[in-house]
Image (cartoon, grey):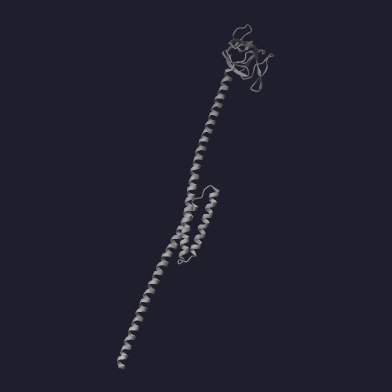
Amino acid sequence: MAEKNSNIGYKITIILLSFIIIYFVFDKIHTIKQKDSMIVEIETQTMQKDSLNDELEDLFLVYEGLQTNNAQINDSLAVQQQRIQDLMTELSNLKASDYARIKQLKDEVETLKTIMKSYVHQIDSLYQANQILVAKNTQIQQQYDNQVQQTQNLSTQNDSLQQTIQVAKELTAYSLNLTALNQRGKTTERSNKVEKFQVCFILSENKVITTGRKYVYLRITKPDGEVLRNNNSGFFNYQGQNIAYSSVKEIEYDGNSQNLCVYYTVDVSDLPSGNYTVFIFSEGKEIGDASINLN
């Protein structure tokens, strides 16, 4: 009987031990599974953390590229960039297992992206407005340049008109004839026989110039360029200087053409041979010239 009871106790002990072993085996398997699950989750969170850091770096570069000429917008962008740097610093010190804070950081990144889009829209609007202003300024500048060009053209036309008027107001001598006369009033070509020089010409018609008393001056030059002068010679103003004249004739000009002859009496005993030239002046202008060669 005692042997039978002993066998039963032994069997019960074996069964209990079996259950205990099975429990520990299953518990160990469960623990291993939990550990593997935690490792996988930590690895996943680490990847999310790295990905979030990459997003922050990209976002920082985007904000940096949004710099404009608008100081107020640039200040706002600088605030957002500083916020991104602060988040990157916090993220680098954050444990991968801090799931809640990582999720909060992801939400903040999305908020920063939304803010960034608003800045892009604002900057684009400013750019469009600036382009319109540039176009208007270009148009205004073109109109101004056109006006300046028109003014310059009018000034040039006015200068040309003034020159034309000035030319129109000038007298002209044509059909000039310089003749050397001897003692008997006859034409001569011998320099030692010359007693007078006769200068005949036609004074042009001019209906623009002021009529009335005018003076016609003769400058007769010898072959060496010296001006012939006698007791009746003098000086007149020409281009701001007083220059010598050989002879002068006072006329009454009525605007119509006139045939004139002016004389110069030689007061030397002998003239050199060569080329003699007469220059005619009136109203402060040279109006004609003629030459003669004497032997």
Task: Locate residue 56, reporting x and y percent.
Answer: 47, 58
Residue 263 seen in the figure: no
Instruction: Classify 161 as above or below 110.
Output: above
Residue sticking out furthest to the front: 1
* Residue lying at 34% horizontally and 79% vertically, measured from the top left: 22
Question: From the viewer's perspective, is 202 left or right of 91?
Answer: right
Q: Residue at x 57, y 20 (%)?
A: 165
Residue 91 picture location, percent across and down: 48, 62
The foreground one among 281 and 67 is 67
User: Which of 295/165 is in front?
Assistant: 165
In this rendering, the answer to whether 143 lies above or below 160 is below
Q: Quadrant of residue 2?
A: bottom left
Q: Nearer the viewer, residue 152 or 127?
A: 127
Residue 122 position, x and y percent, is 49, 47
* Residue displayed at 31% across by 88% down: 8
Question: Quick one: quadrant of the C terminus?
Answer: top right
When asked about the image quadrant of residue 212, the answer is top right
The answer to whether residue 50 is visible is yes
Quadrant in the picture for the N terminus: bottom left
In the rendered image, the residue lying farthest to the bottom is 2
Above or below: residue 85 compared with residue 159: below
